[in-house]
């Protein structure tokens, strides 16, 4: 993954702009009027929000940024425009008399939001007004529609048509209107909730992919990027899909993460990167922004520093279907994929050393882990000690492990049929022919290897030792 020259790109953002206001202060007492804390406000901070935050993210990366948005004719609009202009953003506000600029006030104490108050009323903006605003920005490489359902996009399709006639790609961050309104968009970026609102629920990854492709075909959309919180992102194109696991780091505040994703995606595409590489970069940027407090943006140097630490195809927890796509990408790079499996109930030094040895057998290491029901069947009453999600999280945090996936059966044979790894590794005193799935891997041209385990180091022994205390 490489960082493009963002300074060659110019992004036009169109959308619902807001002012995010933070009242910061300490809390030392409870109100005498009601059982609520009293915040002694010591400072007030204003930040661009909504589409304004998208435009700010574009500018912070180093790209040229223009914004068309609706505001009131009020002080909040002046504050918002001043902040954006000071960051070099070319603002074209449709200022509506009698309306108030959308403002969200957050009361914060010790970096924790105590309450949020929203000041907003829906705008009623004619699409022709938006197109006129677009015409004031004669040169731009791509368009972002940041739709927060606040009234700017009464007819997004005509805005999209205007941009596409000029040969400009259009990237949409949608909300809850029917996706048919975004007819002709290049990429649509819903989160899971927004996608379910558009296509209904699904029972499997395959069903979700089919629903997305059916929708894309119906509205002439080239790709869909589904942001899935802790599950990362899935890029769905017309003939293939790619999954990008969430970057492993502490999540502090998810406010504005979607704005960052669409901004980085647009700027990267406009700078000449492929769609997949742009999504990978946006995924890294999302990992940065959720580790910060409040609505914020990611700078080019900050993104570059994080990319230096990032894995090219991502690391982390995956579903079986997502892992199949990741393995295909890895194989396309000529990488050798290693597979091992186990319960990994209490992670110990023996596991860590074994997984390090397994990783040295190839380029990518998959660890398949038994579900809670499977562990209980195999190990008996009281097991597992740690539930599945905790076990997967611990394994995903190891430097040697690339991907972690779970399975419900007593053996991982179904996964081996799907993935066909280059190397199947097992630890212990097994003979090669005793390794479950050895025949599956060898028949696909792979190898099977048995590695030694550290003596006197096992989960069962640790459990018994603890019980004897």
Image (tube, rainbow, N blue to C red):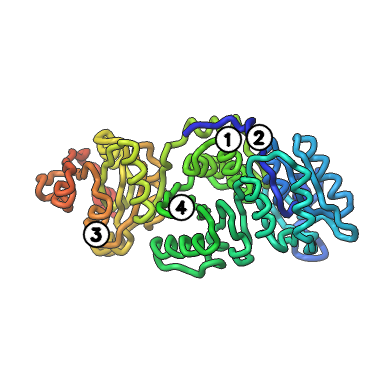
Label 1 – label 4 distance at C-alpha: 20 Å
Q: Which mark is residue 63?
A: 2
SS at badge 3: helix
Query: Which tag, 3 or 2, sits closer to the chain's start?
Result: 2
Residue 77 relative to residue 9: left or right: right
Label 3 – label 2 distance at C-alpha: 56 Å
Q: Residue 263, image x and y in percent?
A: 62, 44
Query: Which tag, 3 or 1, sits closer to the chain's start?
Result: 1
Q: Nearer the viewer, residue 92 or 363?
A: 92
Q: Residue 343, image x and y in percent?
A: 28, 53
Label 3 – label 1 distance at C-alpha: 54 Å
Name the residue beneath numbered marker 3: 379
Task: Kindly tell me whether residue 106 is visible in this rendering.
Answer: no
Q: Are marks 1 and 4 in contact (CB under 8 Å)?
A: no
Please rate how many residues cluster around mark 4, counting C-alpha atoms within 10 Å: few if below 14, some from 14 to 19, many from 20: many
Please rate how many residues cluster around mark 3, counting C-alpha atoms within 10 Å: few if below 14, some from 14 to 19, many from 20: few
Name the residue beneath numbered marker 4: 237
Task: Give me the residue at 69% from left, 37% from top.
Answer: 59
Q: Which mark is residue 271?
A: 1
Task: Give me the residue at 71% from left, 50% from top.
Answer: 14
């Amino acid at each position: 993954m490489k960082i493009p020259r963002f300074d060659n790109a110019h992004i036009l953002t169109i959308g619902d702009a807001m002012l995010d206001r933070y009242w910061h202060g300490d809390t030392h007492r409870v109100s005498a009027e009601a059982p609520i804390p009293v915040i002694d406000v010591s400072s007030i901070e204003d930040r661009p929000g909504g589409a304004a935050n998208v435009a700010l993210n574009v500018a912070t990366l180093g790209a040229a940024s223009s914004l068309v948005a609706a505001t009131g004719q009020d002080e909040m609009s002046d504050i918002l425009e001043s902040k954006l202009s000071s960051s070099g953003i070319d603002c074209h506000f449709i200022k509506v008399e009698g309306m108030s600029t959308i403002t969200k006030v957050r009361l914060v104490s010790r970096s924790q939001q105590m309450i949020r108050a929203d000041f907003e009323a829906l705008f009623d903006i004619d699409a022709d007004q938006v197109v006129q605003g677009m015409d004031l920005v004669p040169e731009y490489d791509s368009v972002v529609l940041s739709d927060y359902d606040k009234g700017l996009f009464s007819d997004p399709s005509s805005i999209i048509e205007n941009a596409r006639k000029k040969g400009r790609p259009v990237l949409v961050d949608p909300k809850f209107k029917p996706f048919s309104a975004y007819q002709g968009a290049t990429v649509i970026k819903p989160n899971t909730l927004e996608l379910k609102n558009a296509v209904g629920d699904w029972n499997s990854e395959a069903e979700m992919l089919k629903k997305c492709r059916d929708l894309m075909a119906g509205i002439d959309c080239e790709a869909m990027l589904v942001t899935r919180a802790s599950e990362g992102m899935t890029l769905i194109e017309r003939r293939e899909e790619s999954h990008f696991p969430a970057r492993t780091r502490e999540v502090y505040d998810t406010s504005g993460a979607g704005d960052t994703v669409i901004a980085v995606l647009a700027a990267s595409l406009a700078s000449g990167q492929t769609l997949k590489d742009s999504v990978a970069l946006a995924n890294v940027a999302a990992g940065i922004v959720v580790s910060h407090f409040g609505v914020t943006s990611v700078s080019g140097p900050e993104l570059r520093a994080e990319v230096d630490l990032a894995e090219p195809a991502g690391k982390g927890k995956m579903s079986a279907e997502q892992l199949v796509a990741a393995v295909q990408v890895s194989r396309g790079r000529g990488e050798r994929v290693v597979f091992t499996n186990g319960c990994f109930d209490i992670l110990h030094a023996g596991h860590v050393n074994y997984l390090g040895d397994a990783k040295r057998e190839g380029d990518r290491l998959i660890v398949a882990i038994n579900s809670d029901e499977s562990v209980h069947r195999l190990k008996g009453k009281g097991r597992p000690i740690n539930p599945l999600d905790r076990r997967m999280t611990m394994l995903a945090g190891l430097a040697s492990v690339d991907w972690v996936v779970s399975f419900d059966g007593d053996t991982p044979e179904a996964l081996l049929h799907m993935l066909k790894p280059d190397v199947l590794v097992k630890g212990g005193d097994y003979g090669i022919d005793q390794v479950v799935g050895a025949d599956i891997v060898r028949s696909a041209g792979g190898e099977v290897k048995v590695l030694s385990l550290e003596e006197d180091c096992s989960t069962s022994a640790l459990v018994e030792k603890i019980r004897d205390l």
